[in-house]
Amino acid sequence: MAFSRACLIPFLLPLALAGCGGSDLPNVDEASGNAADPALASALQDQIMVDPQLGRQANGDAIRPPGQPYSAGVPDDGVAANTDKVDLGELIKAPAPTEAGKDCTECAAARESVTLGGLAARQKDTRTSQCAASLSYGTGWANRLPRDLPLFPQARVTEAAGSEEGQCALRAVSFSSAQPMQTMLDYYYTRATKSGYSSEHQLDGNQHILGGTRERDGGSYVLFLTSRADGGTDIDMVANNGS
């Protein structure tokens, strides 16, 4: 059966338009009276610049969420905030620890606190606990510990916080040292006692607690020390008399 030309027109018209390559068709923007924005066209056509470091942290193709939150401040292995050469000099041996009892508030705080702020807030020294709410975080606070109780040379800082609000001079820092437990105990015991602080050494399970006060200015400090598998020591320190 033959088809009329009128019947073929609807089918041939799309093919004819396609064969033109669009060269004779009016630009939509021009037809509407709106010329294309060169800046917009450039922005849409240019390549996207991607920071490879942040791209890896985005973890967009991972099945599971990132293993840790984004952090630009502290490298994975910590920051050597005190690069002084280790010079132990003559150390006074710290006394043997006494077994911590149920009334050891510092022991409970160390076990149950998950942040430096929480650890500071649970100290029995009221000057320390009251200033804990105003702590701000940053590795720079590790270099502003009390001059008598500085950050150990070559320490690797994992977290630090401090407060200067009102009368506060609170410092809190988590760090690790390649030195063994006894050396770290002797170092801070020597610094504390020579600076007029009292010093009490307690043992709570595998954790050593060294702390004391100084009557002349109301200063106080406490250190929580745990041995590392590599022979070094992990330490959390809270002091209320920062520089």
Image: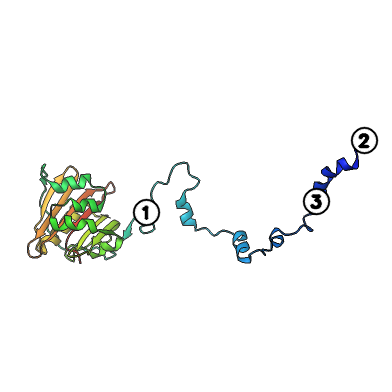
Nearest the camera: 29 or 107? 29
Residue 158's image quarter?
bottom left
Is residue 217 shown above or below 174?
below
As helix, strand or loop, the secondary structure at mark 2 comes to loop
Q: CA distance from mark 3 to mark 1?
A: 61 Å
Lateral position of residue 159 relative to residue 111, left or right = right
Is residue 203 shown above or below 167?
above
Nearest the camera: 184 or 88? 184
Q: Which residue is mark 1?
A: 76
Kind of residue sitting beneath label 2: Ala
Across and down, in percent, residue 68 comes to: 38, 48
Disc nearest the viewer among 1 and 2: 2
Of the two numbered discs 3 and 2 on the same chain, state the one appearing first in sequence.
Answer: 2
Q: Is residue 181 visible?
A: no
Q: Which residue is mark 3?
A: 17
Of the two numbered discs 3 and 1 on the same chain, state the one appearing first in sequence.
Answer: 3
Q: CA distance from mark 3 to mark 2?
A: 25 Å
Across and down, in percent, residue 223 comes to: 18, 54
Kind of residue sitting beneath label 3: Leu
Q: Residue furthest right?
A: 2
Q: Which residue is mark 2?
A: 2
Lateral position of residue 101 relative to residue 131, left or right = left
Is residue 13 shown above or below 132?
above
Across and down, in percent, residue 119 comes to: 21, 51
